[in-house]
Image: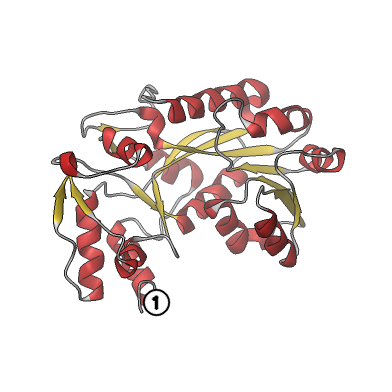
């Protein structure tokens, strides 16, 4: 199979690192010239993601699998704008990496893929529009993976604590689902192998308060966790505030059933244990 990746971000690159050997040819787009040069040294065929030439569009049209990890822009979605026609006219199965933010706030209640989408702000509203636009274009060739809070090598509470950036912000009753990047890679592979499309929640088994994750990581490191900081007094960026605006517990049973998912890291503790054993967060 030939793989075309739109946006070599953290999750897409991890998928290629772990499963790239399953593909005869891997190409795609990345906006950063430095990252494009770095990935090209690994033997990947990378293009500028902002101005695709005819050869780039041909690669997309001839791909067997297209993985889209580039987020929507402030206006038009770059993947749809630049590659929509080429992908629609091709044969590829498309795996689109979305977010569980599309469900909105459920005040801590359990939800699943049958829960109506209720995006609350512009960033996740754009996600819903893009999901729907791709579904209209390619129908059952589309697999949407709605991801929880992503963590993994180089991006986790251990690293944040060691760098002195971690905060233990407490909003009573607040819980998040998370997902290790290696399990995202497994979900992408499962979606590629499935004959029909759909939408699946790719999250761990245990939604948990964010302060518990930080405290657990600190315990692994043998250090005191940061003091608890009430949410109302915490200075947060608009994006960080948006994570705390929605409170929900998300089921992943359908991913296990349909995609054959066996989560390597079903809880944040399992994920952090493995990262610590691998040397993450050590000085």
Residue at 73%, 28% in the rendered image: 88
When asked about the image quadrant of residue 242, the answer is top left
Q: Where is residue 71 in the image (x, y as percent from the top left)?
A: 55, 38
Q: In the displayed structure, does residue 110 sit left or right of residue 115?
A: left
Q: Check the image and report above or below for 4 versus 14.
A: above
Q: Check the image and report above or below for 134 versus 16.
A: above
Tell me if I can see residue 92 in this picture.
yes
Q: In the displayed structure, does residue 51 sit left or right of residue 205?
A: right
Q: Check the image and report above or below for 24 versus 147.
A: below
Q: Where is residue 121 in the image (x, y as percent from the top left)?
A: 39, 25
Q: In the displayed structure, does residue 261 sit left or right of residue 80?
A: left
Q: What residue is shown with label 1? A: 279
Residue at 71%, 39% in the rendered image: 50
Residue at 24%, 72% in the rendered image: 220
Determine the residue located farthest toward the right in the rendered image.
Answer: 54
Residue at 58%, 33% in the rendered image: 197
Q: In the displayed structure, does residue 18 sit left or right of residue 80?
A: left
Q: Where is residue 279 in the image (x, y as percent from the top left)?
A: 39, 77
Q: Position of residue 159 (x, y in %)?
A: 36, 66
């Amino acid at each position: 199979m030939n793989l075309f990746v739109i946006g070599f971000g953290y999750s897409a690159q991890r998928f290629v690192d772990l499963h790239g050997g399953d593909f005869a040819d891997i190409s795609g787009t990345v906006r950063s010239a430095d990252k494009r040069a770095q990935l090209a040294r690994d033997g990947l065929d990378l293009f500028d993601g902002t101005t695709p030439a005819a050869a780039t569009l041909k690669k997309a049209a001839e791909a067997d699998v297209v993985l889209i990890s580039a987020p929507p822009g402030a206006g038009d979605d770059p993947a749809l704008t630049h590659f929509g026609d080429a992908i629609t006219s091709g044969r590829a199965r498309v795996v689109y990496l979305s977010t569980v933010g599309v469900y909105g706030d459920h005040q801590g209640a359990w939800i699943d893929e049958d829960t109506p989408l209720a995006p609350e702000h512009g960033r996740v509203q754009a996600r819903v529009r893009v999901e729907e636009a791709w579904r209209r274009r390619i129908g059952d060739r589309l697999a949407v993976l709605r991801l929880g809070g992503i963590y993994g090598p180089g991006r986790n509470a251990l690293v944040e604590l060691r760098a002195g950036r971690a905060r233990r912000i407490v909003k009573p009753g607040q819980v998040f689902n998370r997902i290790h990047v290696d399990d995202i890679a497994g979900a992408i592979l499962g979606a590629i192998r499935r004959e029909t499309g759909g939408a699946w929640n790719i999250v761990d088994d245990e939604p948990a308060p964010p302060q518990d994750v930080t405290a657990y990581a600190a315990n692994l490191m043998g250090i005191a966790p940061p003091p608890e900081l009430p949410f109302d007094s915490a200075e947060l960026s608009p994006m960080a505030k948006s994570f705390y605006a929605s409170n929900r517990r998300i089921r992943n049973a359908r991913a296990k059933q349909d995609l054959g998912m066996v989560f390597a890291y079903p809880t944040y503790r399992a994920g952090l244990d493995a990262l610590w054993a691998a040397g993450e967060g050590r000085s």
